[in-house]
Amino acid sequence: MTAPILQPTPENIAKAANILRAGGLVAMPTETVYGLAADATNAQAIVRLYEAKGRPRFNPLIAHVADMEMARKQGVFSKQAAALAQAFWPGPLTLVVDLEGTSTVSDIARAGLNSIALRCPAHGVARALLTVFGGPLVAPSANPSGKISPTRADHVANDMGERVDLILDGGPCESGVESTIIDARGHHPALLRPGSLSAAEIEAIWPGLVRPENNADAPVSPGQLLRHYAPKARLRLNVTAPDADEAVLGFGPVKATLNLSPSGNLAEAASNLFFMLRQLDQTHSRIAVSPIPEDGLGEAINDRLIRAASR
Ligand code: TXA
Ligand code: MG
């Protein structure tokens, strides 16, 4: 049976919170992508979540919190980590910090690590659900592991409808690429995943951002080693002369099948990225993507495209 897609009325949010309390899975909108939420303290619910996504158990989950008070119960915040949270929460920033002794988040959700990834989302529906539920919720993107992240409720229904209990419809996600993940445990902020918040925005609060090499011997963020965002179609990047049979995913003033942003706006391109990739993947077997500048949000967009193009 496919999960119902419900409008986020107070009654439906209360219903969603009850499903979570009973160990169920609820898809919720966030400002980045749709997340698949489960009670972060319920090991059984988390096992079900890993199974629903087909996610390898070594890949830890982000615990979402309603506010700083909830966050401090789970993780240890250095002065610099607290400054980042103060500047960007609620918002698309995930902080990896040391696990606090009072943490209630299940070991399975952390893949046994002694660190924890925490994020306080900005989306009104995610915030309402966290507040009514009253505790941390783990929420990976609501797609089968390795596939394109969902930015609309119907993406979740198509990909995961049979494996979740309820989908809250918050409309299209505003920013469209996942949160920026910063390891805030060291002397410098370390960029584990480029995302909706640009490197420059992080550096304005805590300078000296480093980009650690992710290699299999010492994975700094286990999920970054996995295949990701994979469409069925073959993707070619930085294309200025597309082949006749290729769909063109454009950027800027170019002739395109779909254009991420005709005016060359990176925020607009990020919010369209997964939606348009999904569209073209349904109609074409080859997709050529226009060059996209690497500055600002371009770093996150190019990161997703490179992963989507790799086989
Ligand atoms: O925008 C987002 O962050 C979305 C929305 C739903 O909040 N969530 C999301 O979750 O993208 P997911 O599971 O698709 O990606 C989480 C990433 C994975 O690459 C995982 O390896 C990493 O976070 N991660 C989680 N805990 C970690 C930890 N303790 N240390 C390093 N990386 C961690
Ligand atoms: Mg994901």
Image (cartoon, rainbow, N blue to C red):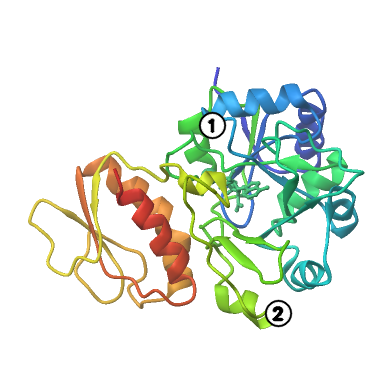
Q: Quadrant of residue 197?
A: bottom right
Residue 188 or residue 250, whichever sits in front = 188
User: In the displayed structure, does residue 67 sit left or right of residue 152?
Assistant: right
Residue 266 is tagged as none
Can residue 152 be seen at all in this image of the molecule? no
Q: Measured along the vertical axis of the image, is residue 201 above or below residue 229?
A: below
Q: Quadrant of residue 51?
A: top right
Badge 2 element: helix
Residue at mark 2: 205
At label 2, counting other C-alpha atoms closer than 10 Å, the crowd grade (few under 14, some 14-19, many 20 or more) is some
Residue lying at 75% horizontally and 33% vertically, measured from the top left: 107
Residue lying at 67% horizontally and 35% vertically, measured from the top left: 111
Amino acid under disc 1: Arg
Residue lying at 57% horizontally and 70% vertically, measured from the top left: 210
Residue 273 or residue 84, whichever sits in front = 84
Amino acid under disc 2: Ile
Q: Is mark 1 within 8 Å of ligand 1?
A: yes
Badge 1 element: loop
Q: Is mark 2 within 8 Å of ligand 1?
A: no
Residue 55 is tagged as 1
At label 1, counting other C-alpha atoms closer than 10 Å, the crowd grade (few under 14, some 14-19, many 20 or more) is some
Q: Quadrant of residue 263?
A: bottom left
- Residue extending farthest to the left is 244
C-alpha gap between disc 1 and disc 2: 34 Å
Contact? badges 1 and 2 (CB < 8 Å): no
